[in-house]
Amino acid sequence: MMKWAAQWVADQAKTHTSESVRYYRDAQFVDIDASIGQTDQDYQEVEGVVVTVTRADWIFDTADLVLNGSATLPEVGDLIVHVIGTKTFTYKVLPMEGEEKHWRYTEHLTKSRIRAHTKLVNES
């Protein structure tokens, strides 16, 4: 029952909160539906100052990330391009500070959705 409920929530999020983006790895790309989120992370610099880093997170179905005919997982350096009207926003997949890597499953029961941590690297 819990697995069914988790999948239902994931399906609702994809249907009602996602937008079309293009996911790139080198010259390969795939168009996927993804929702944008945010992760704020505090870390302490050498001088003792606490700095908050805000990252844009892209949440999408694991099954949608297929490049060159093969299912794959996010890699550091992959790009996500989001077009809004006449503006293009390019995000790079990067790890968070500390122990958190560059992506994670949104839940571990079904592993049906991925949350990729990114940084805005270009706006045109």
Image (cartoon, grey):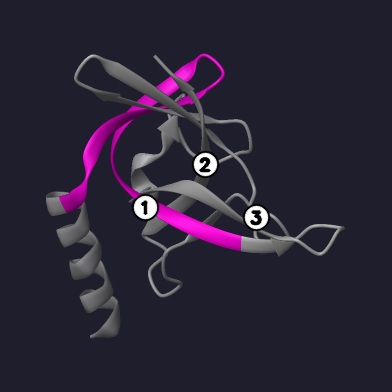
Please tell me which residue lies in front, 3 or 103: 103
What type is the residue that disc 3 sits on?
Lys
Q: Earlier in the sequence, mark 3 or mark 1?
A: 1
The stretch of residues the image draws in magenta is 17-41
Label 3: which residue? 101
Q: Residue at x 42, y 64 (%)?
A: 106
Label 2: which residue? 118
Residue 79 visible within the image: yes
The rendered magenta stretch, by its main secondary structure, is classed as: strand
Q: Is residue 83 above or below residue 41?
A: above
Near mark 2 (Cα within 10 A), the count class, few <14, some 14-19 or many ≥20, is many
Q: Earlier in the sequence, mark 3 or mark 2?
A: 3
Dot 1: what SS? Answer: strand
Extreme bottom residue here?
1
Q: Residue at x 36, y 52 (%)?
A: 37
* Front position among marks 3 and 2: 2
Label 1: which residue? 37
